Amino acid sequence: MSCPPQAVPHNALRQKFIQHWQRATDCNNISLHGFRRFKTIHLLNLRFLEDEIAGLDHGIYQAGLSLGHDPSSSDRLGLRYGKKDENAPQLDETITQETISRLRSLLKEYGM
């Protein structure tokens, strides 16, 4: 089951497309070897997926920081340097079955 993409304001979507287009076409190693493989479109799709996943990641990260736990002694994730957003949503608003399902779906799409 695929979740519909989150609505993005048109101006923000336009800006993201411009950024993604520049990254997707700024590659010295783009070669299509006789078959049209839609490489640019695949790269753009991955950039949009990365943005959606990053948005979820930020919310989940903020939920973790809101717990107020001290980082482990090894702190491999660098949590001691994390900054909690002032207006971060409540944990119960962020960590829902819908969020987890959406994250799994996006990660599956990204891994294809």
Image (cartoon, grey):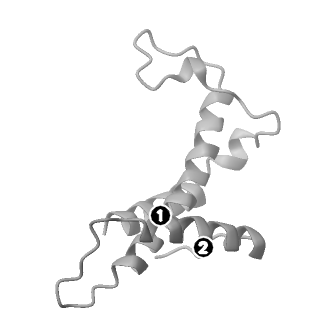
SS under mark 1: helix
Residue 27, given in percent of the width and then of the height, sits at 36, 65
Which residue occupies the foreground of this view, 19 or 101? 19
The vertical placement of 90 against 84, above or below, is: below
Amino acid found under the numbered disc labelled 1: Arg
Q: Is residue 110 above or below residue 88?
A: below
The residue wearing badge 1 is: 23
- Above or below residue 112? Residue 78 is above
Q: Quadrant of residue 61?
A: top right
| Distance in Å between CA atoms under marks 2 and 1 | 22 Å
- Left/right of residue 86 with respect to residue 64 in the rendered view: right
Looking at the image, the residue that sits furthest to the front is 28
Residue sitting farthest toward the right: 87
Left or right of 87, for residue 8: left
Residue at the spot x=62%, y=47% of the render?
Answer: 95
Residue furthest toward the bottom? Answer: 35
- Which one is nearer the viewer's eye here, 7 or 99? 7
| Mark 1 neighbour class, 10 Å CA radius: few under 14, some 14 to 19, many 20 or more | some
Residue 62 image position (x, y, % from top left): 65, 36
Q: Quadrant of residue 67?
A: top right
Residue 17, placed above or below residue 62: below
- If the image is split into quadrants, where does the C terminus sit? bottom left
Residue matched to label 2: 5
Mark 2 or 1: in front is 1
Q: Residue at x 31, y 65 (%)?
A: 28
- Helix, strand or loop at mark 2: loop
Sequence-first disc among 2 and 1: 2
Q: What kind of residue is marked 2? A: Pro
